[in-house]
Image (cartoon, helix red, strand yellow):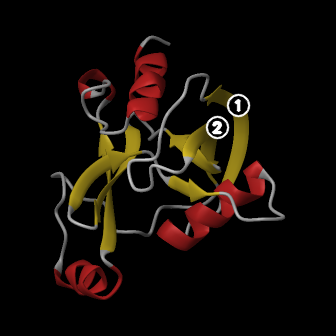
Amino acid sequence: MFNVRVYGILLGENGQVLVTDELIRGAYITKFPGGGLEFGEGTRDCLKREFKEEMDLEVEVGDHLYTTDFFQMSAFNPEYQIISIYYWVKALEPIRAPLRQKPFDFDEREMKIYEERKETETFRFIDADAFGEDIVTLPIDKVVAKLISNR
């Protein structure tokens, strides 16, 4: 079975890269914003929905950057193969979601969400000169981080 994921690369005014720090079932993961494609949804619509749900942010989905071109088993369900699709995105409004300075800097509200759902997240920008594949956790994200760093 396949699990299709769609992620957005959003750059800040000075070229910083937006990442999300997530705590999922006890695992600490830094990745790009986005999530799972729902049945009946296009990839671009999925990404717009994910940014709206996660950050309350309207985005414009731009050019395609990368689609997984190797086998990647799901870290959470070994019966699934992950296919991730990455696009450049642009914020159409100011970011209102709290932005953190440190990794995994969850506040009390976010930890309450974790207790209920067993997952929570925060967002932060990484300066372009500090960004690289060592910042992100997931294997496919590392490929994309390398592409971003080499551009």
Residue in the foreground of this view, choosing between 130 and 144 = 144
Q: How far apart are the two marked residues, 2 and 1, measured between alpha carbons?
A: 4 Å
For label 1, the crowd category at 10 Å Cα-Cα, with few meaning under 14, some 14 to 19 and many 20 or more, is: some
Side (left or right) of 150 relative to 71: left
Q: Amino acid at mark 1?
A: His
Whether pointer 2 and pointer 1 mark residues with C-beta atoms closer than 8 Å, the reply is yes
User: Residue 123: percent from the left, percent from the top?
Assistant: 34, 57
**Residue 56's disc number:** none
Mark 2 highlights which residue? 87
User: Residue 142: percent from the left, percent from the top?
Assistant: 38, 27
Mark 1 highlights which residue? 64
Residue in the foreground of this view, choosing between 109 and 12 = 109
Side (left or right) of 51 relative to 22: right
Quarter of the rendering containing residue 107: bottom left
For label 2, the crowd category at 10 Å Cα-Cα, with few meaning under 14, some 14 to 19 and many 20 or more, is: many
* Res 26 seen here: yes
